[in-house]
Image: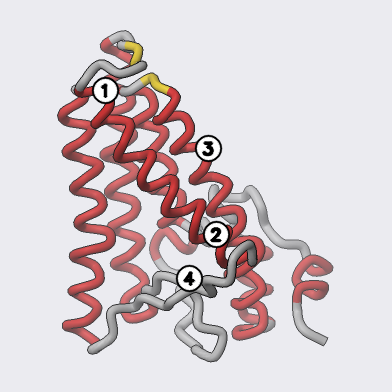
């Protein structure tokens, strides 16, 4: 099952980043990648470092498990549940990326305005791509019970909290104003109904 987990993880990286980037380039002439601020210890820097760290740990976990390095073997039922979660997470990532169409981006360009996507899974939650990635990593942690797999999930959660709360939500409020405020007030941040922004939250995040 470890080999299957590794294969799914690699497939996810290839489809979610490689194939999606190539598809965006072919469709629009733009890869969708926006270079983050690399100034050390800025919010953007922390978000990028944590995100890359989570991806590396997510890959290290199954590789280490192949060599039986600090890995416990879960009951078969737990492993099967983990496999199901990995598949569910991967599907959610890909379906959500497809729903974004030409608005798909990695990173934020403060001077750019893209469509506010509210269709598909975005009608239920504001960040379904990140939710799918989290589900995939949670599933992998059930298959591979190790410090690396748990750390990958924990670091990923920290990364998306920084990226979403400190970078993306303020940008979307500045860019889309009342349209995003209304959308954020009725949809959850990562799960349906959880993390909806109240009116006073959106007002305080908007520029004066």
Which residue is pictured at 17% across the width and 30% down the height? 4
Q: Quadrant of the N terminus?
A: top left
In front: label 4 or label 2: 2
Which residue is pictured at 16% across the width and 28% down the height? 3
Tell me the SS state at disc 4.
loop
Q: Position of residue 9 (x, y in %)?
A: 25, 42
- Along the line of sight, the residue nearer the viewer: 162 or 23: 162
Looking at the image, tell me whether mark 3 or mark 2 is earlier in sequence order. 2
Tell me the SS state at disc 3.
helix
The residue that disc 1 covers is: 65
Q: Position of residue 185 (x, y in %)?
A: 68, 64
Tell me the SS state at disc 2.
helix
Q: Quadrant of the C terminus?
A: bottom right
The residue that disc 4 covers is: 118
Q: Position of residue 106 (x, y in %)?
A: 40, 70
Looking at the image, tell me whether mark 3 or mark 4 is earlier in sequence order. 4
Q: Is residue 5 positioned above or below 181 on the image?
A: above
Q: Going by the image, does 168 lie left or right of 137?
A: right
Q: Residues within 10 Å of mark 2 (few under 14, many from 20)?
A: many
Q: Is residue 148 positioned above or below 177 on the image?
A: above
In front: label 3 or label 1: 1
In front: label 3 or label 4: 3
In front: label 4 or label 1: 1
The residue that disc 2 covers is: 47
Marks 1 & 2, CB-CB < 8 Å contact = no
Looking at the image, tell me whether mark 3 or mark 1 is earlier in sequence order. 1
Which residue is pictured at 20% across the width and 84% down the height? 27
The residue that disc 3 covers is: 154
Q: CA distance from mark 1 to mark 2?
A: 27 Å
Q: CA distance from mark 4 to mark 2?
A: 24 Å
């Amino acid at each position: 099952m470890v080999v299957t987990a590794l294969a799914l993880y690699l497939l996810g990286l290839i489809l979610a980043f490689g194939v999606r980037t190539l598809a965006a380039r072919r469709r629009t002439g733009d890869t969708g990648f926006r270079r983050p601020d690399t100034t050390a210890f800025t919010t953007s820097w922390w978000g990028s470092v944590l995100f890359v760290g989570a991806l590396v740990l997510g890959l290290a976990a199954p590789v280490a498990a192949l060599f039986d390095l600090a890995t416990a073997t879960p009951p078969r039922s737990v492993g099967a549940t983990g496999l199901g979660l990995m598949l569910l997470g991967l599907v959610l990532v890909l379906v959500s990326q497809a729903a974004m169409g030409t608005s798909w981006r990695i990173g934020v360009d403060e001077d750019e305005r893209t469509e506010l996507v509210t269709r598909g899974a975005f009608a239920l939650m504001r960040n379904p791509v990140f939710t799918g990635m989290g589900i995939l990593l949670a599933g992998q942690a059930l298959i591979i019970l190790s410090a690396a797999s748990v750390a990958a999930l924990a670091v990923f959660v920290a990364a998306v909290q920084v990226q979403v709360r400190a970078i993306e939500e303020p940008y979307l409020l500045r860019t889309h104003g009342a349209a995003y405020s209304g959308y954020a007030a009725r949809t959850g941040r990562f799960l349906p109904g959880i993390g909806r922004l109240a009116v006073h939250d959106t007002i305080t995040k908007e520029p004066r």
